[in-house]
Image: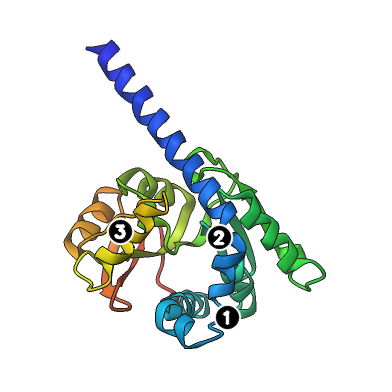
Amino acid sequence: MIGGKVMARIGREQSRVARVESARAFWSDNAKQFDAYYELRNWRDRLLHQPLQIRHDAAMAMVRSMRAPAVCDVGCGSGRQLEGALQAGASRCVGIDVSDEMIRLVHDRFAGSPYAGRVTTHVGDVLHWQPAERFDLVWALGVFDYEKTPGPLLKKLHALCSGFVLLTFRRIWAFRSPFRKLTYQLRGQPIYLHTRSSIVKELREAGFLDIRVERLTAGLYVARARVSQARVSE
């Protein structure tokens, strides 16, 4: 029995490593293209990628509702949310992403910036990251699109957080979700869809309190919650 459990754990870890490596390769190959989506340069971009701006705005509103929070951006991508958070009043930001190319874009973004001394980055799988601090605000925007089982990552975010989390999840019932899922599957990066009840359940099991899950866009839920030690800002 013990041997079976050990083998099962090794199997899960190997599966996780394979998924992370697949995600690293996918996002490194598509880093510049994805970053350009935020520009909303034409009607097609505005039609397809407006949710990126909406979730960005939701994150900035969370920063402004707090008093100079220390922010951790899990799946920070090219650093647009890191930059926005500092502009919105964050005291400092830490970003982590599996893609070394995405982190290179972060470094390019902050080269010569007055905020450069207040942002740090890490490359790797957040589940194996052991920072020496906890953060007032932790967010993972779009990350759960690629997590087959949210529980382990949610527990990790709880461990990283001393205050609040802000998370987005792809809605299973949205009209475009099946097409998006098929498109990403064909590109070699599967995505996963969620219901409001499943999100609430996973957050509770991870130890979060004051859970709120709302529709952010037609295709996205946004979830806000706190850890037990957090205090609501005045």
Residue that appears at 82% across and 70% down = 112
Pointer 3 local density, CA inside 10 Å: few below 14, some 14–19, many at least 20? some
| Circle 2 Cα neighbour tier, 10 Å, few/some/many (<14 / 14–19 / ≥20) | many
**SS type, badge 2:** loop
Q: Is residue 234 visible?
A: no
Q: Which residue is mark 2?
A: 76
Q: Which residue is mark 1?
A: 39
Please tell me whether mark 1 sits on a helix, a strand or a loop: loop
CA–CA distance between discs 1 and 3?
Answer: 25 Å
Q: Residues within 10 Å of mark 1 (few under 14, many from 20)?
A: some
Dot 2 or dot 1: first in sequence order is: 1
- Mark found first going from the N terminus, 3 or 2: 2
Where residue 39 appears, as percent x and y from the top left, is 57, 80
Q: Is residue 198 left or right of residue 117?
A: left
The answer to whether residue 61 is left or right of residue 218 is: right
- Residue 40 location (% of width, % of height): 53, 83
Residue at image position (56%, 63%) is 71
Please tell me which residue lies in front, 32 or 129. 32
Q: Which mark is residue 182?
A: 3
Amino acid of disc 1: Glu
Residue 226 falls in image quadrant: bottom left
Q: Please name the amino acid that badge 3 sits on.
A: Leu
Cα–Cα gap, marks 3 and 2 = 24 Å
- What is the residue that sits farthest to the bottom in this orientation? 43
Q: How is the image coloured?
A: rainbow
Q: Is residue 29 left or right of residue 3?
A: right
Contact flag, marks 2 and 1 (Cβ < 8 Å): no
Write down the quadrant of residue 92 in the picture: bottom right
Please give the name of the residue rendered at 47% of the width and 88% of the height, measured from the top-left corner.
43
